[in-house]
Image (tube, rainbow, N blue to C red):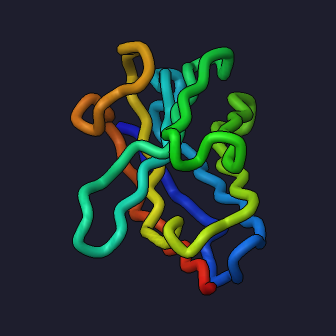
Amino acid sequence: QVQLVESGGGLVQAGDSLRLSCVASGRTLSIGPMAWFRQAPGKERELVAETSGSGGRTYYADSVKGRFTISRDNAKNTVFLQMNSLKPEDTAVYYCAASNKWYGVPTSAAKFDSWGQGTQVTVSS
């Protein structure tokens, strides 16, 4: 069992930056790819960014390419999402997810075994 805890969300203005963190605990040796998803009110959960177990492969949704960067520190069992040039349409609850198996990118939400509780990101115009 892996537990994930996100932090770093908040209320910012358009153009600002935020850095989300997700710390894993429990059976961390089993963790492979990790990802950030988001879900806005009335919308489906969508994959924002994903990184392979080593961090050598990444994936970004078209809507965040060039603005968001996913990275991980395996020594600290932590994955980050650096979000720059935030837009109001980035407003959502952001969830961290982890899988114990590599499926290639992008990976569907159903393939992720562990989820965090989510952190709210609100971008005002």
Q: Residue at x 52, y 33 (%)?
A: 50
Left or right of 118? Residue 8 is right
- Residue 2 spot, x, y in % from top left: 41, 40
Q: Nearer the viewer, residue 3 or 22?
A: 22
- Residue 51 spot, x, y in % from top left: 57, 28
Q: Which of 64 and 77 is in front in this view?
A: 64
Q: Which residue is drawn at 66% across and 22% down?
A: 55
Quarter location, residue 110: top left
- Residue 79 spot, x, y in % from top left: 64, 42
Left or right of 47? Residue 29 is right
Name above or below for residue 13 compared with residue 70: below
Q: Residue at x 41, y 25 (%)?
A: 106
Q: How many labels does the image show?
A: 0
- Residue 4 spot, x, y in % from top left: 47, 50
Where, quadrant-wise, is the N terminus in this rendering?
A: top left
Q: Residue at x 50, y 74 (%)?
A: 120
Name above or below for residue 54 compared with residue 95: above
Left or right of 33? Residue 75 is right
Where, quadrant-wise, is the C terminus in this rendering?
A: bottom right
Name above or below for residue 68 compared with residue 88: above
